[in-house]
Each structure stands twice: as structure tokens, then as C-alpha cells.
Image (tube, rainbow, N blue to C red):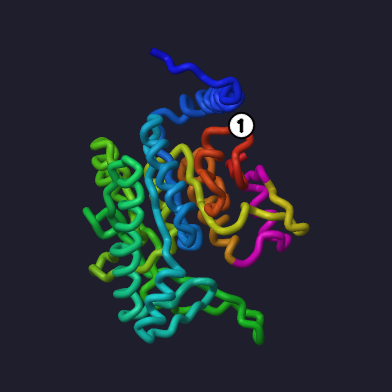
Amino acid sequence: MKESLAKDALPNVHVRAEVLVQALPHMQRYDQEIVVIKYGGHAMGDRAAAEDFAEDIVLLEQSGLKPIVVHGGGPQIGRMLGRLGIESEFRGGLRVTDEATVEVVEMVLAGSINKQIVGWISAEGGRAIGLCGKDGNMVRARKATRTVIDPESQTEKEIDLGLVGEPEHVERGVLDAVLKAELIPVLAPVAFGADGQTYNVNADTFAGAIAGALRAKRLLLLTDVPGVLDKDKKLLTDLTLEDCRRLIADGTITGGMIPKIETCIYALEQGVEAVVILDGKVSHAVLLELFTDHGAGTLIRRA
């Protein structure tokens, strides 16, 4: 038997009904589709926001989507290195990773952070499983190479990042089996090389490789900025591949946003339908992007 509603509760009920009406077509669009969500280390700082994120992931799975979470952990790695007295060095925006550092990276990413996110999802009623790229030979990496412009000679110079890797091959069978079991994969961006060497992989790059290999419907890059901004610091809501290349060339996109955009370009070229860069600190940002008409952040398509 239905409970009677007080008159002052009716407006709230109507608002909820309108939300469901708006969300339903989006849920149908994504039914049984793979969505890869990169959850940045900076976005994990607020406990309430982290719990909202976990709630979003569970709701996606219960709505018929197949979410895959890839997480970073740069700030957490930095704090642990500091506690152990290991100095951090960055070149070209990436952490230089020696043998001592890669042990800490693996411990923090594949250990504490990975299991923390699994715990948050489990607390919201989801069934998550924590993995890294080494599990089941899921991701094979090669040593990453980067070049920078030498300020004195104005020529390109290759920089050595140590044990920083970039994905070379993704064995999707592992993830297919996990998804078939109706589990939510939570992936740490640690991978192995052909020689068995452990590599620290940038989480954006790792997520792009996973999304590309699985031909995901969406790749969401949750970060600590609203999205891609123009030169007046206003949000650009819709971009194409051509727009992205132009904005890099004219200096609108700079710094740490460049590798994120490069990941977007790679994922789209591999068959991902669209990529979104959005602020992971916004409450329920994932749901706003996927289940509302206005979305959130910057949506990037091939054309």
C-alpha cells in the first residue's frame, strides 16, 4: 500500500520524477556499454566526494552499464616518498621513477589506494575487484620516451624517466571475464615489460589504453579542473580532434592538459566514441555527465 504524502513533499517528488524522466533515455543509450572512468589522485582528497564517486559507480553498474575504474595517486605517492626520505623528481611533467621509487609506486597504487576504492564501492553495495596491469598479463608496457625543448639550443632533447612506462599491449580477455562476472574492475596503473620489469604508467595514458582496447562507449577523465579552458579561462564544452590539435598549436592548451588531450586523441582514434574531461571534485560528476542533458566538463569527439 502506498504511503500518503504531505503537501510540502510533493514538489520534491515531482523534481525526482523529472530527474528520472531525463535520465532514462541516457540509461538506455548506455545499456550494456563499457564506460572507463579515470579517477585522479587529486580528486580523492575529499572523503565525501570519494563516497559520492563510489555511489555513482555502483549506480552505473545497477543501471546496466559496465564501469571500469582506473585510478591515479600522485599526491599519495609523493607523501609516502616524503615519509621514506626519497626525493621526487619530475621531468616533462612525469615522475622520474628509479628502482626504489617504483617499489613505493606499486605499494601505494596497487595496494592502499586500490583497496581503499574497492572498499568504498563495496560499502555502497557494489562488487568491485582490485587489479593492476600485471595481473593476468593484462597490460604490457615499454619504457616511455619523452623529449623536451632545450632552452639554450632550442633543439629537442630526450629525457630519461627511468621506470616510467607506456602501454604497449592490452589483453582484454581478463577484463571481459571480470565484466561477465558482473564485477567492477578497479585498476592501478602499474604494468610489466617484456623482461618482467615493473613500470609506473601515467593513469590517464593507462585509462586511454584500456578504453581503446575495449572500444568503450565513453572515457571519462576526472581531474581537478572543470575541463578544457579557453584563453579567458572559460570552459569549452564541446571539441573535435581538429579543435584539440589547433588549441595545442596556438598555445591555448598547455602544461599538464597536453598529455590529457593526447590521451583523448589516442582513445578516439582507437574507436572510443567520446571522451570527457571533468572535475572529479564536483559531487556526482559522473552521473551529471552520463545521465543529464547538459553533461559536465569538456566533451571531445572525432568530428
Apparent side of residue 136 relative to residue 27 in the rendered image (left or right): left
Q: Is residue 281 above or below residue 214?
A: below
Q: Which picture quadrant has residue 100?
A: bottom left
Q: Nearer the viewer, residue 13 or 209?
A: 13
Q: Nearer the viewer, residue 124 or 302?
A: 124
244 in magenta: yes
Q: Residue at x 38, y 84 (%)?
A: 86
Residue at the far top: name it: 1
Q: Nearer the viewer, residue 33 or 197?
A: 33
Q: Which residue is mark 1?
A: 293
Q: Which picture quadrant has residue 240?
A: top right
Apparent side of residue 29 relative to residue 7 in the rendered image (left or right): left
Q: Which picture quadrant has residue 289?
A: top right
Whether residue 22 is visible to the viewer of this picture, yes or no, is: no
The residue range painted magenta reads 237-255
Residue at the far right: name it: 232
